[in-house]
Amino acid sequence: MPFPFILPTTSGISFTDYFSSSTHPSLPNCATTARGVVRDVLKRYKRIPPAAQASNLSTVLAALQDYLPYLFALDAGLSGTSCAGEEIDLVLVKELEVEWRSTLGATLPGREPSRIKLKSLESELFFTLSTLAYVYSLQGRAQLHTLYNATLPSPEQRKTAISTAMNHFLEANAVHTYLMNRSHQWNNQPAAADISSPVLGALAELSMAEATIISVLKDDPYPAVVVEDRNKQSRDWMFKGVEIPKVRAHLFARLCLAASEHAAKAQGMLGRAKVDESFLRYVDDLRRTAKAKACRFVGCDAELGGKTGEGIAWLRGAKKELGFAAMGADEEKKSSGLSKLKKEWKEKREDKKVEKGEGWGADAGKFEEGRIIDMLLKKWEKMNDTLGVQLIPPSEQLIATMPSGRDIHTPKMYIIPALEEHSIIRMRAPPDPGEAFEGEEDDSGDEERDQSAPVGAFPGTKGEYSAGTSYY
């Protein structure tokens, strides 16, 4: 369950105020128009109800992909490199100033993230590419949402959704990795935490962790079994869990451990970064969930081999990795029902989020994995108590013997988009002053200005409530 990123919004600018070109005088105009479309698309996306935003991601992606070639052309002109086989002579009239709204930076609870003033074309490029990577992640998230709907997909639909989501996360990883490598050239870290080197490195590790753990989801049968187990009429506790071949179980465990290692690296990079608490919790939950999945797969392998006691120990270790109390049946009866009630309430709240398609997955699938482990523990403990009693070893000793993680994906390289030859030729002509388009939507700072309006005031009527103004 990937993190629900929020796409940033930005202020309107005209590149003609900051750049001029003797070889391609229309380039600043064309870049301004493409950026104006991106700005409007991001503002409209923000106003769409969260449940309907997924269907609008393709529009945002298309606008970003149309804008980036112009942005890289400006970057090539400043750095003295060729673009589409041509040299672009670009002169900096004055330093570029732009504002982007930080969506990963730390902010007060209940307050919208603030806009941050940035200088240089590099900051504009980094925020635009970061937004592109967020869109890829959200597209992968939208594909995975189909697996948790009330209507279970067919095996072919499930395979297609997982494969498509995996590709989206690998694309996001390529963008984040490119930005992380490029950020090493900076002398000073930017004011926005979203495009700082530690956060970019953490995002690259996080996207690879998500792509790795998704590769296991395709062949993991237990999420569907949990849905059946929730049926109150079910009386099949005496049946064993779904069988997984021994080799595959160990392979799945190593893949989950690799995902956990990537998440742990991301968590380490974010140690001193001033980012949102919900994002930090998600990274920690993903690390725990991936480690718990690995314990569960090794436990399934042990149980299928007749070592039920060892399998129970692995499941109890998985619960500890998730942060849930691991206890036997007798201890569970004696324990207070408050913690159990709280856990059930969180699970139901997550179910409602999945049903509405709004804000789901912020726990990285921790509660879903907890349900699988609880289901298997209940069955295996009853089987061990009634059919064949085996000693249950300490889970800490078993977890210490876990194998190393194994990566399955080869990271992709981000290919810098270049303008087509006919576009470069067209920009040799003088610009038409009326062609520049900076966007039609209101400035992204309007929301902040409206926050200072009196309580109950209609938006845009702040002036009518000022001192000395006649109300009648």
Image (cartoon, helix red, strand yellow):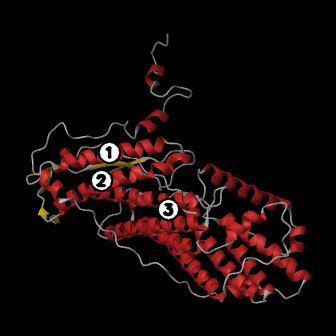
Q: Which residue is mark 2?
A: 66
Does residue 456 appear in this view? yes
Q: Which residue type carries mark 1?
A: Val
In contact (CB < 8 Å): disc 2 and disc 1: yes
Q: Which residue type carries mark 2?
A: Asp
In contact (CB < 8 Å): disc 3 and disc 2: no
Quadrant of the image for the N terminus?
Answer: bottom right
Q: Nearer the viewer, residue 116 or 339?
A: 339
Q: Residue at x 18, y 54 (%)?
A: 423
**Distance Cα–Cα, label 3 vs label 2:** 21 Å
37 versus 158 height, above or below: above
Residue 140's disc is 3
Q: Residue at x 24, y 43 (%)?
A: 14
467 versus 331 height, above or below: above
Residue 307's disc is none
Q: Residue at x 39, y 41 (%)?
A: 444
